[in-house]
Image (cartoon, rainbow, N blue to C red):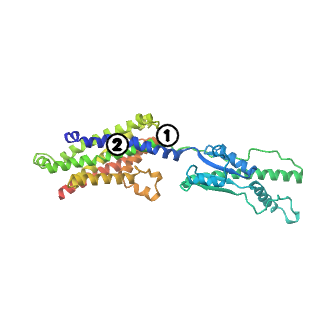
Amino acid sequence: MLLLFRDRAGLAMLFVMPMALILIMTLLQDSTFKILEEKQMSVLVLNYDADTFGINIVEGLKQSSVFDVVERLDGKAFDENAMKQQLMLGNYRIGIVIRKNATTALKNKIRLGIQAQFPVEEGPIFDLDSTDASDTANVKLYFDPITQSVFRQNIISALHEFSAAVEAKILFGIYADLFNDMLDIQLKPTQKLKNLVVFEQEYASTAINKIVPNAVQHNVPAWTIFAMFFIVIPLAGNLIKERQSGVAMRLKTMPGSEQAVVFGKGVVYFVVGILQAIFMLLIGFYVLPLFGMYSLKIDSHTLPALALIIIATSMAATGYGIVIGTIATSQEQSSIFGSISVVILAALGGVWVPTFMMSEFMVTVSKLSPLNWGLNGFYDIFLRNANITEVLPYAASLTIFFLLCLLISRFYTKFK
């Protein structure tokens, strides 16, 4: 404890640096997370059709809560070249061009399909419009080169949905005219030919509805775990100081077990890890909202699970510091290897880049990092309101990692 309290740089690294990291990284990543969860995408639209198909597609986009339709730039009309320029500059991500005579081409295609259902001897039952029957209702999509595939799929899926609704509407109109001409039956218009199938959405846990994943819920636990594992530098450094100064040798001449000395150091840094976690979480609860961020939320019944994950993570971090301090032969070795290894484990574990942004291969690799185990435990608590039973596998993995570090330290000392 005396060595720790006298190491002001070490204390700053353990408490001040993580607080600054949480504030800075959350502020930096807030916009990125908002893009991932944003409800509207700005879409440039050029409707050259100006008929049933084009009008209904544009109206469908406008009525959707996902898209913000832009038909004029700075109050002025624009052409296709101007649209491309805006997309290349990154001002917009998606551009839609509905070609001229799209409605006429669509009607002709439908009429040809209906005509094919009648016997040949009936002859033509429609007078096709002047547009070539081979024409198609063409919609051109332009994308900003950096647009992610998920956004491209969203706009394409939405357009397919709107297009299907317009096709059904036009099809019903053509059949209504056909019935009127052939059978003198006037069909009544109906608005009930859409949303016939109801898709019900429900979370596996009802409590998840209360919490939307955001930058705070990722960065606070992520950098808390990162800070806790940075215990490796002062803890390993103090173990090496004792060996170099001769204190470790004098301690060995005293009656008692060497494990008592190691556990004495471990308990101090274990408590430091607990304090780190408490301070970092308090920032998420009370400080980040002052910067316009979300606030961490947690139900009372998940507090035992939170305490378990904090304890297990602090144990794992302490064990890692002990094994590094045992194996390293100098403070330079311990500080360089310790810091770099923690950064690598953090990168693999989803601290720097969340695992849901990683490839499937990297998601599999991330499971090898103890920081990922702790982070997933925090995720379950903050996003799924998990109880002790649900986070127990992560806590068990961290505890096994702690015991494994102690065993390695023990056997390495005896071997040495």
Distance, label 1 to label 2, CA atoms, is 24 Å
Residue at the image position 53 percent from the left and 55 percent from the top? 146
Residue type at numbered disc 2: Pro
Spot occupied by residue 218 in the image (x, y as percentages of width and height): 43, 44
Name the residue beneath numbered marker 2. 18
The mark closer to the camera, 1 or 2, is 2
Name the residue beneath numbered marker 1. 211
In this view of the protein, which residue sits in the foreground, 35 or 171? 35
> Quick check: 1 above or below 406?
above
Return the mark for residue 19. Answer: none
Mark 2 closeness class: few <14, some 14–19, many ≥20 residues within 10 Å: many
Quadrant including the N terminus: top left
Residue at the image position 85 percent from the left and 52 percent from the top? 179
Choose the circle earlier in sequence order: 1 or 2: 2
> Quick check: 301 above or below 94?
above
Residue at the image position 78 percent from the left and 55 percent from the top? 104
Spot occupied by residue 148 in the image (x, y as percentages of width and height): 54, 54
Quadrant including the C terminus: bottom left
Residue 289 picture quarter: top left
In this view of the protein, which residue sits in the foreground, 123 or 78? 78
Residue type at numbered disc 1: Ile
In this view of the protein, which residue sits in the foreground, 86 or 391? 86
Whether residue 320 is visible: yes
> Quick check: 195 above or below 413?
above
Apparent side of residue 51 relative to residue 279 in the rendered image (left or right): right
Mark 1: secondary structure? loop
Apparent side of residue 215 relative to residue 314 in the rendered image (left or right): right
Apparent side of residue 113 relative to residue 281 in the rendered image (left or right): right
In this view of the protein, which residue sits in the foreground, 22 or 359? 22
Spot occupied by residue 235 in the image (x, y as percentages of width and height): 24, 47
